[in-house]
C-alpha cells in the first residue's frame, strides 16, 4: 500500500518482492492507519467495519450465479468473523486485536465501500468528525491515487459503485461532534486488486506511479 507512510513508495521501489493489499484490507488500512499513527484511535480500540463489495471478486462461480439471476441480491458472509483479510488489517493498521468484520455482497459487478463507525467521546482528544477529516486530508496530501473528500461536501447517499472502473480511492468522512463515519470507496478490481498491482509495478520499474491506470 504505497500510501501507507511517507517512506512507503521508496520502500516499494527498492523491494525485490511486493505483496499487494487485499481488497477489503485496502479500505480498512487507508482509514485506520492514520488514526492509529496519530494516537486518536488506540491500538486496542474495539472496531467494527461494515463493508459492501461487488460480486466480481468472488470468482467465476459467483459471477455466473449473479449474472444468471440465481444469487441473492444482498448477502452477508464470513459469519464466523474470521475473514481471511483480518490478519492483514490488524497487522498493517497497527491494531492489537482484529476488528469485527462481516462483509456484504451486493448485486453489482464492481465497487466497494468499507466503513468505520466511531463514538468520538472514546477517542483520544475527543475530536469531531471535521477534525478527523482534516487529519486524514493532511496525512494523504499529495497522493496521486488517494483523495479525501472535503468535509461537508459528501452526497446525500453514498454508493459503493461510485469508483467502479477507476484505480483511485476516495475517503469520505461524515458525522458530527459525537459520532463519525469514515468510508473508503473504491473499485474492488482497481485500487482493491489489479490497479494496486500496476501501481506497485510502476514504482518497482521506475515508471510514473499512475502509468496505465484509470484516473477520474
Image (spheres, helix red, strand yellow):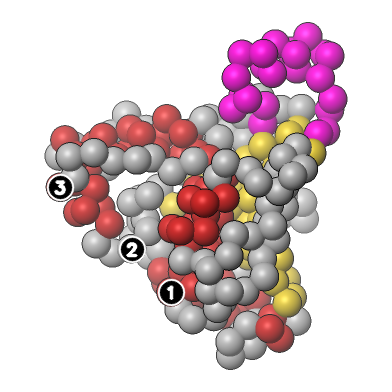
Which residue is disc 2 drawn over? Answer: 5
Query: Earlier along the polypeptide chain: callout 2 or callout 1?
Result: 2
Taking the image as shown, residue 126 lies to the left or right of residue 35, namely: right
Q: Distance between the residues labelled 3 and 1?
A: 24 Å
Total label count? 3
Disc 3 element:
helix
Classify 10 Å Cα crowding around label 3: few (below 14), some (14-19), many (20 and above): some
Decide: is 164 above or below 56.
below
Which residue is disc 1 drawn over? Answer: 37
Disc 2 element:
loop
Query: Earlier along the polypeptide chain: callout 3 or callout 1?
Result: 3
Classify 10 Å Cα crowding around label 2: few (below 14), some (14-19), many (20 and above): some
Residue 169 location (% of width, % of height) = 50, 47
Query: Earlier along the polypeptide chain: callout 3 or callout 2?
Result: 2
Classify 10 Å Cα crowding around label 1: few (below 14), some (14-19), many (20 and above): some
Task: Specify start and end residues of the magenta stretch as a single range.
Answer: 54-75
Which residue is disc 3 drawn over? Answer: 14
Q: Do the residues bearing badges 2 and 1 touch, measured as CB atoms within 8 Å?
A: yes
Asked if the magenta segment contains residue 136, the reply would be: no
Residue nearest the viewer, comparing 58 with 120: 58
Amino acid at each position: 500500500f504505497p500510501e501507507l507512510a511517507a517512506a512507503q513508495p521508496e520502500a516499494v521501489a527498492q523491494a525485490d518482492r511486493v505483496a499487494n493489499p487485499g481488497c477489503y484490507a485496502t479500505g480498512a488500512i487507508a482509514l485506520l492507519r492514520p488514526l492509529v499513527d496519530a494516537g486518536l484511535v488506540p491500538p486496542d480500540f474495539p472496531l467494527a467495519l461494515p463493508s459492501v463489495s461487488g460480486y466480481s471478486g468472488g470468482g467465476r462461480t459467483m459471477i455466473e450465479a449473479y449474472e444468471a439471476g440465481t444469487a441473492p441480491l444482498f448477502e452477508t458472509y464470513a459469519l464466523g468473523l474470521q475473514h481471511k483479510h483480518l490478519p492483514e488489517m490488524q497487522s498493517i493498521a497497527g491494531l492489537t486485536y482484529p476488528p469485527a468484520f462481516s462483509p456484504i455482497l451486493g448485486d453489482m459487478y464492481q465497487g466497494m465501500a468499507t466503513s468505520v463507525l466511531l463514538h468520538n467521546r472514546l477517542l483520544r482528544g475527543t475530536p469531531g468528525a471535521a477534525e478527523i477529516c482534516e487529519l486524514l486530508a493532511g496525512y494523504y496530501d499529495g497522493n496521486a491515487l488517494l483523495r479525501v473528500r472535503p468535509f461537508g461536501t459528501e452526497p446525500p447517499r453514498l454508493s459503493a459503485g461510485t469508483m467502479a472502473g477507476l484505480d483511485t480511492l476516495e475517503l469520505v468522512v461524515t458525522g458530527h461532534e459525537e459520532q463519525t463515519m469514515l468510508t473508503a470507496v473504491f473499485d474492488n478490481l482497481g485500487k482493491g486488486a489489479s490497479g494496486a498491482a500496476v501501481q506497485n509495478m510502476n514504482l518497482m520499474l521506475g515508471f510514473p506511479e499512475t502509468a496505465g491506470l484509470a484516473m477520474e
